[in-house]
Amino acid sequence: MSKKLKACYVVVLCAVLIFTLAFVGCKTTAAETTAAAGAAETTAVAAAETTAAESAAVAETAELTGYEDIDIWFDTGGGEGDSFGTVVYNGALAAEKDLGANVTYVFSDWDAQKMIENFKLALAAEPDGICLMGHPGEEAYGPLIDEAEAKGIIVTSQNSDLANIEGKYMGNGFGYVGQDLYGSGVTLAKTSISKWDLKAGDKALVWGWLSQGTRGLRTKGCIDGLEAAGLVVDYIEVTKAGQGEPSIDVPGIAAWILANPDVKLLLADGGGQTLVSQNVMETAKKAPGEIKVAGFDLSPATVDAIKSGYVGFVLDQQPFLQGYLPILQVCLTKKYNFSGLRIDTGGGIVDEKNVDLLSDLAKKGIR
């Protein structure tokens, strides 16, 4: 064999060898790929089954039912049929229905002493939780709440906060659902000044609850907000009789307005006081808007007063939530050991521009 022919033979032999190795390698790779794909599919199916099982377990754990054995005492704050308290009550009823808890309702006519008495009744019954109105203040409530906590009763508050007590027992489920009271009063004052271009030296009347512990902070915010802008502020306290029936105070407020013809603004610190503000102005023979009026919260009467121009605007603290969320707080704390939640429900201004959106809800006792 010539050298040239021998060289060609070697080249061909090498080519065959390379092809064979490549072919074997391809078969091995394909087999490995098929095996890997099968393994991946099996893993994916197993993972999907595990995820589905875990999701089902989570869904069962987080289900918002199963609170039928939880007993709660709830103070609505007002009296039966009270405009604001009724919306709070409606919210609590909705939570009771949704969650299945057993709720005992008490009515305090916005009387701080009745609130204390009702808390003592609740304490004696030893329920799982007590939802209270904070109006009496920390000094009055402190020892009673200490006693409740020592018995393992979950306590939480709505409408008027008890900041120091909340800080002490937040880990045990003591929360707060309501407005920043002082801040809301300041907001009402500042919004009134801006909306109606009020000036230093203008006279204003604040009608509120200054003497009532924590509840009085909102009235103080109204006064401070006006005085900071230089307005001359006069103040009238809601009478004891007027706490439960605001219309009782109408003649006295109207008489003050007649005696102070230069007054330009009335701030009504309370849902009940706001809803009778049109009656005040009509009794004092004032036309809609002749004296500017601002207040808190909605009711069918307040909606009508905004539409007619007797009330310029309200700061709505959404009392339905102050009924619903404390019930939820107690249930979640009892079942899952959640700590207290602080929820500010009040920040929305309702005036002639948006009152129609909420009119039907106010009639239904939701807003």
Image (tube, grey):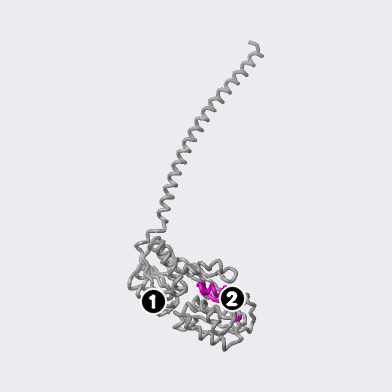
Q: Quadrant of residue 204?
A: bottom right
For mark 1, give the secondary structure.
Answer: helix
Q: Is residue 246 above or below residue 26?
A: below
Crowding around mark 1 (Cα neighbors within 10 Å: few <14, some 14 to 19, many 20+) is few
Position of the N terminus, as image quadrant, is top right
Looking at the image, is mark 1 or mark 2 earlier in the sequence? 1
Which amino acid type is shown beneath numbered disc 1?
Pro
Residue with the mark numbered 2: 309
Residue ID at (64%, 81%):
199
Q: Residue at (57%, 84%) from the top-left corner? A: 285
Is residue 111 visible in the rendered image? The answer is: yes
Tag nearer the camera, 1 or 2: 2
Examine the rendering and report whether any part of residue 167 can be seen: no
Question: Horizontally, is 175 left or right of 23 in the view?
Answer: left
The magenta-colored residue range is 290-313
Residue corresponding to mark 1? 143
Magenta-span inclusion, residue 157: no
Category of crowding for the residue at label 2, using alpha-carbon neighbours closer than 10 angstroms: few (below 14), some (14–19), many (at least 20): some
Q: Secondary structure at mark 2?
A: loop
| In-front residue for pair 32/340 | 340
Report the front residue among 136 and 152.
Answer: 136
Q: Position of residue 152 (x, y in %)?
A: 36, 68
Q: Marks 1 and 2, how far apart in space?
A: 47 Å
Q: How many marks?
A: 2
Q: Give the residue type that dot 2 points to.
A: Gly
> Residue 104: where, in percent of width, then height?
36, 69
Q: Nearer the viewer, residue 153 or 192?
A: 192
